[in-house]
Image: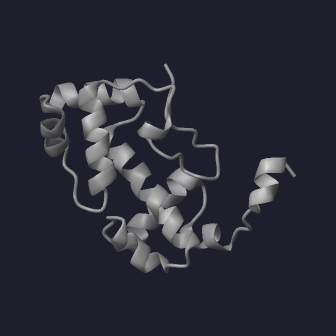
């Protein structure tokens, strides 16, 4: 089964909807859409299950089976993806943390380091490949 995530990459992957090879059931698609819209707010497993129209246990099992990670981990991935964009745009990490739904900067830092492999500060300081380098392979 295709998995959405490749943690070895420098960027946290986009989203379930951006992966054409992944076929998710309608309930899981609804939950993913809800996460994509509401990632900055507290998102409970019960709320996601209700959005999907499933029991909590069935939802958690089906989500992990179809997406490859737990619903909580997926929420964190979405938050980190948005944090990366804000950091690249020059927003300070302390503001990014609350903007994307983390409790504080240290909470952001723990999840960011786990998923991206570096702290938000190192991420901002790391050189970015230019667009033409990405397309030409230089």
The residue located at (48%, 39%) in the rendering is 18
Q: Measuring from the top left, give residue 58's x and y in whole percent.
A: 19, 25
Q: Position of residue 31 (x, y in %)?
A: 26, 39
Where in the figure is residue 122, as x and y percent of width and height? 64, 70
Front-most of 134 and 99? 134
In percent of width and height, residue 112 lies at 50, 59
Give the residue furthest to the right: 138
**Could you tell me which residue is drawn at 12 percent across and 38 percent down?**
50
Most foreground residue, 100 or 115: 100
* Relative side of 127 to 53, left or right: right
Please name whichever residue, 27 or 92, is drawn nearer the observer in this view of the structure.
27
Residue 119 lies left or right of residue 93; in this view the side is right
Quarter occupied by residue 127: bottom right
Question: Which residue is situated farthest in the top direction here?
Answer: 1
Q: Nearer the viewer, residue 13 or 73?
A: 13
- Which quadrant of the view contains residue 73? top left
Q: Is residue 19 left or right of residue 117?
A: left
The colour scheme used here is one colour
Q: Is residue 116 left or right of residue 18?
A: right
Residue pictured at 54% horizontal, 50% vertical: 12
Q: Is residue 72 above or below residue 27?
A: below
């Amino acid at each position: 089964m295709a998995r959405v995530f490749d943690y070895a990459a420098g960027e946290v992957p986009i989203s379930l909807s951006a992966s054409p090879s992944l076929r998710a059931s309608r309930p899981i698609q609804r939950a993913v859409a809800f996460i994509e819209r509401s990632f900055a707010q507290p998102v409970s497993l019960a709320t996601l299950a209700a959005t999907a129209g499933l029991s909590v246990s069935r939802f958690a099992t089906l989500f992990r089976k179809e997406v490859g990670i737990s619903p909580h981990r997926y929420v964190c991935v979405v938050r980190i993806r948005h944090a990366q964009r804000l950091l690249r745009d020059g927003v300070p990490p302390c503001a990014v943390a609350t903007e994307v739904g983390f409790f504080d900067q240290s909470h952001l830092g723990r999840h960011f380091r786990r998923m991206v492999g570096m702290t938000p500060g190192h991420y901002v300081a790391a050189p970015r490949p230019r667009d033409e380098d990405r397309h030409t392979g230089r």
